Amino acid sequence: MKQRKLVDMIDMRFVRENPDAVRESQRRRGNDESTVDALLAADDARRSALQEFEAARAAQKEISRSIGKASAQERPAILARAKELSERVKELEAAANAADQAYEDANHAIQNIVLEGVPAGGEDDYEVVRHVGTPRDFAAEGFQPKDHLDVAEGLGALDMARGTKVSGSRFYYLKGVGARLELALLTMAADQAEENGFTLMITPTLVNPDIMAGTGFLGAHSDEIYYLPADNQYLVGTSEVPLAGYHKDEILDLSQGPIRYAGWSSCYRREAGSYGKDTRGIIRVHQFNKVEMFSYCRPEEAKAEHRRFLAWEEEMLHKVELPYRVINTAAGDLGSSAAQKFDCEAWLPTQNRYMEVTSTSNCTTYQARRLNIRERVEGENRICATLNGTLATTRWLVAMFENHQQPDGSLYIPEALRPYLGGKDHFSPLA
């Protein structure tokens, strides 16, 4: 038997030594904590099956060596025993392979272990960390704000009707000042990333199944992903995926600090299960552009790196002069790979609510373990940590159109963006 390399997402040693902590993580996520006991049982069964197989194979090899030394009288009995052992070894090999697969399935059933400080519960159980900025008082200014679609159409910045005609619902054309505004926003994000030591990358938007699975995106929400069966490839919903796969099966040198990349890419999401939600405009669409931060770092440095990612996201929000809040996402609303996630949500005046515009996740060693990405420390290899965070995306235009609209239909351009737009301080409405 050539032993198949098992692919873990959860560190089995940690599970064996801290089963209660893993059960608590599953409870806080709203998951079935019995999956932990199932994993422990599967691990025991795998070890037992492998030991039984190896013992039988050793006996088989021993008797095979004895055949040449046997007398004519002894040989028939030895050959019969060798045949019997051969059949037994085949049975035990199949059982060991099945136990390996059962173990791997049980390991993948447990999502990343949430960190201390992550609130328990579901989508509505987030913790507000802080509010930043004050929403505009449009009533005091004496006019009723338009929603982002009306503002954008008034500027000639967006064409939803022809997007639908050409590609179907939830597609659109950014045009004229809309296209320029998005390019300016993403370029400002790319500049900020490079200023903070990120290497800018324009990434592939098609990836192989092992990369998509390795990042944890083929779990409960795999129906959100576009799959191309003729090619057996996936369209990515974020450049996090190709950036995570960039160093698959490699050993990194993190002695000088984290390795950081900023991915600029188009992103694709089916938005399955979101029918009827945010159908107007470009809040929830199938294709958009994004600049995404990604970091490989030492596990003990991941929490500090996570705080840095959040600070860089907030720096971008200050630059575009949007009021926002930061939330600590509840465990049940985390993706399977995230151990903690902070969202920044911009104020949306026409809907009187906050809308997510960025998120940053600490994935600890969950993704790197699956993708076999390690670092060398004191002569030994160990799994590193990965983190991701959004610096800017198409959805930001929604908040900018609504918060920066003027009574005459023009759009105020934040000061930090003006150098990317030829010095303009506003866009005028169509005549």
Image (cartoon, grey):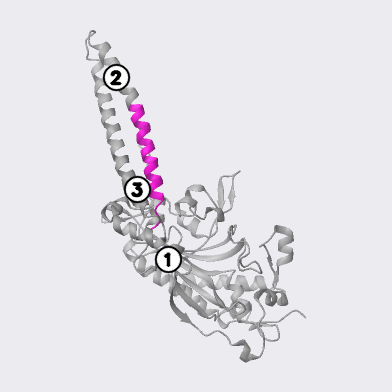
Give the image location of residue 329, x and y in percent.
44, 68
| Res. 6 visible in picture | no
Left or right: 360 as drawn, with respect to 19: right
Q: CA distance from mark 3 to mark 1?
A: 23 Å
- In the image, residue 181 lies in the stretch drawn in magenta: no
Q: CA distance from mark 2 to mark 1?
A: 58 Å
Left or right: 61 as drawn, with respect to 424: left
Give the image location of residue 373, x and y in percent.
39, 53
- In the image, residue 97 lies in the stretch drawn in magenta: yes
Toward the top, the furthest residue is 73
Q: Residues within 10 Å of mark 3 (few under 14, many from 20)?
A: many
Residue depicted at x 31% and y 48%:
40
> Dominant secondary structure of the magenta stretch?
helix
Range of residues picked out in magenta: 89-113
- Could you tell me which quadrant the C terminus lies in? bottom right
Name the residue carrying label 1: 121
Q: Tag 1 or tag 3, which sits nearer the N-term?
A: 3
* 57 over 342 or under it: above or below: above
Residue depicted at x 56% and y 65%:
290
| Res. 232 visible in picture | yes
Q: Nearer the viewer, residue 241 or 81?
A: 81
Name the residue carrying label 3: 39
Amino acid type of disc 1?
Gly
Q: Kindly identify which numbered label has been placed on residue 82.
A: 2
Q: Tag 2 or tag 3, which sits nearer the N-term?
A: 3
Amino acid type of disc 3?
Leu
Specify the quadrant of the image occupied by residue 362: bottom left
> SS at mark 1?
loop
Residue depicted at x 62% and y 78%:
350
Give the image location of residue 132, x and y in percent.
48, 82
> SS at mark 3?
helix
Q: Tag 1 or tag 2, which sits nearer the N-term?
A: 2
